Image (spheres, rainbow, N blue to C red):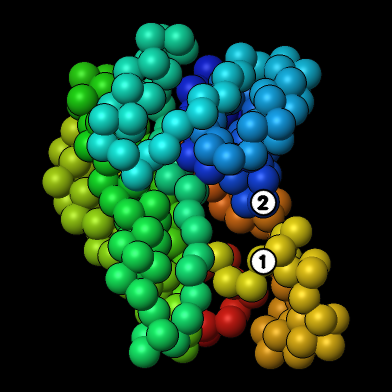
Amino acid sequence: MKILLGKTALITGASKGIGRSVALTFAAQGANVAFTYLSSVEKGQALEEELQDLGVKAKGYRSDASQFQDAEELINAVVAEFGSLDVLVNNAGITKDNLLMRMSEEMWDEVININLKSVFNTVKAATKTFMKQKSGSIINMTSVVGLKGNAGQANYAASKAGIIGFTKSIALELGSRNIRSNAIAPGFIETEMTNKLDEKTVQSWRDGIPLRRGGTPEDVAQCAVFLASDMSSYITGQVLQVDGGMLT
C-alpha cells in the first residue's frame, strides 16, 4: 500500500541531497511531485525524468523561493498543473559559514533570505489553497544547529531556529482548518558534501553519535513521508530530530 497515493507534494531545493531523496521517496509512495531547483539545472531535469519513471506525475520548476513574487507564482503554477497541493516541504537552504567577527552583512542576509524568508514566502502562498481544501501538511527542514547553535554558523543557526518558531506559530494559526505544520531537524547527514571531508574527521563525528553512524538522506525522507501522510494526522507544531540521538 502506497501511503501517499493521490497526494500532490511540492519540495523546494530538490535537485540533490536530502531534497532529492525526499522527492524520490514521496514518488515511490505514490505522490505526484512538483519540485524546485535553482542553479542545478541538469540535475533538476534528470530528477524529473527519474520521478516520472516511478509512474507518478512530476514536474520541476526553476524558481527562487526567497523571492516573494516567485514563490506566489510557483504555488499558483503547481496548483494549476496538478489540480491541488497537499504537502509542502521547505527544504531549500544554504550555508555561508564564518565566525561572527568575520561575517559580512551579505553573508548574513543571504542565508536568512534563502533559508528563512523562503519558508514564509511559500507557506503564505500555499495557505490559500490549504484553507480552501481544509487540509494540508507543511514540513519545514530545520537543523539540530537551530536547536543547539554552532560556532561559525550564527547566520545558519539563526535561520534554522527561526524556522522552528515559525513552524510552531503556523501550527497554532492553521490547526482549526486541519492544516498541520511540523519541522524536521536533521543531525549529521552524510551527503555529497560530507564525502569531500577528511575520513578521520567524519569518523570522529560518527563516534560521538549514540547510534554510531551518520544519517542518510533516506532517513530524513522517511520521516518526511510520515509527516506528509495521514499516519501523522494528529501531529502538529512538532520538531522531529533525525539525528541518531546526537542531542538526546
Residue 148's x, y, as percent?
Answer: 42, 83
Residue 28 in view, yes or no: no
- Which class describes the residues within 10 Å of circle 1: few (<14), some (14-19), or many (20+)? many
Residue 13 - label: none
Front residue of 85 and 121: 121
Which kind of residue does numbered mark 1 sit on? Ile
Q: Residue beneath label 1, please?
A: 189
Residue at 59% over, 79% down: 245
Residue 5's x, y, as percent?
Answer: 58, 22
**56 shown above or below 3:** above
- The total number of labels drawn is 2
Q: Residue beneath label 2, please?
A: 17
Front residue of 54 and 146: 146
**182 shown above or below 144:** above
> In the drawing, does residue 159 fall left or right of residue 189?
left
Q: Quadrant of residue 22?
A: top right
- Which class describes the residues within 10 Å of circle 2: few (<14), some (14-19), or many (20+)? some
Q: Residue furthest right?
A: 199
Front residue of 218 and 233: 218
Marks 1/2: CA–CA distance: 9 Å
Residue at 32% over, 22% down: 73
Residue 12's x, y, as percent?
Answer: 48, 39
Which kind of residue does numbered mark 2 sit on? Gly
Q: Quadrant of the N terminus?
A: top right
Q: Quadrant of residue 194?
A: bottom right
Front residue of 127 and 236: 127
